[in-house]
Amino acid sequence: MVAQELDYFRAIIQANMAPLVKQTDVSHLKGLSERLNHQVWLKREDQQPVYSFKLRGAFNKLRQLPENSHVITASAGNHAQGVALSAAHLGHKATIVMPVTTPEIKVNAVRNMGGHVVLHGHHFDAANAHAQTLCQQQGGVFVPPFDDKDVIVGQGTVAREMMQQLDKLDVVFIPVGGGGLLAGMAVYIKSLRPDIRVIGVEATESACLYAAMEQGEPVELEQVGCFADGIAVKRIGEETFRLAQTYCDEVMLVTTDEICAAVQDIFIETRAIAEPSGAVALAGLKKWSATHSQSSMSLAAVLSGANLNFDRLRYIAERTALGAKSEALLGVTIDERKGSFKQFCNTLGGRSITEFNYRFAGGNKAQIFVGIGLRSAEEELQELKASLEENEYEFTDLSDNELAKLHIRYMVGGKPPVAIQERLLRFEFPEYPGALLRFLEMLGCEWNITLFHYRNHGAAKGHVLAGFEMAPQDHAKFEEHLCRLGYDYQDETNNPCFSQYLKSDQDYARKVS
């Protein structure tokens, strides 16, 4: 072990987390252990006073500072609460810069812990830049959320406790945002037990460590998704990457649906409600176990946080069945005649229908959007598809179609009765009170909106599906307008969901490339 890593190991051993930081439990997940044929353990960082491991790094950083220091940081959630509570306990003054999109529940939590909140910008990067400016202007001490030795040491105490609590341990799964938790835990675990496998887990939509591993150095992602907002980081830290590159055995990615299924598993086993980023490690553990079931091993995952906005539960519950592979979404063509739906149900062989959307649109054929419950995941889905093909049904598997899951399932209602020259786009924009109105104002009135669907599910970004009537010669002008708007968008004109459920049969859209 090189001297620098030995310093980390010693610092983690010596770090005094009392009295503010709690030694959290390690819960045995009995049901999941039986299901996966491995012993599954969950390190419960949701039990901290701020419901997140972030308190550890913040407290360890702030306790190194002189008395009555002024600390400044930027955060939209867990790090902010960790800094605010640590500062109040140690007698420091804390200024926390938070994006204006931060949910009120998190803003109030920081204020209630004694932090002075400054709302600035619509995203973390803007808030972080403003925090740096305040440091220069006011002479404060900036507290990084992850790329700092003292912060990394504090997060490493999670591994110190876990190693003391578990006699047998084969693989540890750790969520990755900026990399502080992974770096601290990995250097401690590998220093003490090199035989234990350390796996970092990221959401597919914010895989900054995975990208850095491929490139051999930290790189900035063009954009990150916001579902697992606690780990939505565009660029891995320099020091955290160095440690991860040395001590992390593997980096794996999990989808939104897989994270939702892990949230459900945690609730069933412990009655705790994890935030999406808090369930990422368990989602990775489950995914890894699917291809490593040959022998019973002792696997541990970190439940990193439970600061969940209550209104997000609806969205998580809706996606859970898809993540657990216990539901399939299909677009099916059936005859437009009496008794055809009953005949279709008979073809399902007793499987339950979880959702059914249909509207009469004339003609000889009907397009239905149907959810079907599954008992044995992929194997049963293949059997279902074979049965539909045998009975000569035309169908499309929409289970992994994001447009279908975000919008189409809520708005199946028929096609326009007349031909429309139409384009379909899906937008994302920062979510805050008045954000939808601002989006519409920026969109302007130059093009007729033919379709619109918006749904607030408590996330940091709003999702809109919009159709626009326009002639082909206006496409270039429209593209220029979209670029000026600055919103993330995706053209869905050629998505099969559009043609099946929403687009006029005489529409020109299939010609658009």
Image (cartoon, grey):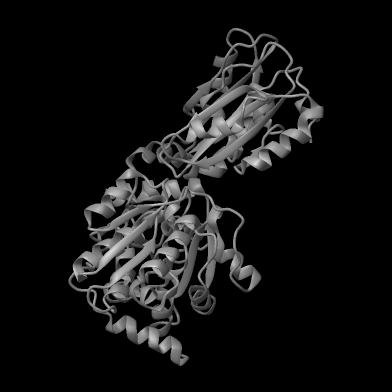
Q: Residue at x 33, y 81 (%)?
A: 12
Quadrant in which the C terminus is drawn: top right
**Image height of 242 relative to 282, above or below:** below
Tell me which corner region of the image, top left, top right, bottom left or bottom right, holds residue 11: bottom left
Q: Residue at x 34, y 73 (%)?
A: 159
Which x, y percent locates residue 66? Answer: 26, 79
Let me know if residue 136 appears in the view.
yes
**Image height of 464 relative to 294, above or below:** above
Q: Is residue 454 left or right of 484 when viewed as pictured?
A: left
Q: Is residue 396 left or right of 512 when viewed as pictured?
A: left
* Extreme-front residue of the structure: 137
Which x, y percent locates residue 168? Answer: 34, 74
**Image height of 368 relative to 108, above or below:** above
Which x, y percent locates residue 482? Answer: 67, 38
* Extreme-left residue of the structure: 19
Q: Residue at x 63, y 30 (%)?
A: 387
Which x, y percent locates residue 72? Answer: 35, 65
Front residue (pair 182, 142): 142
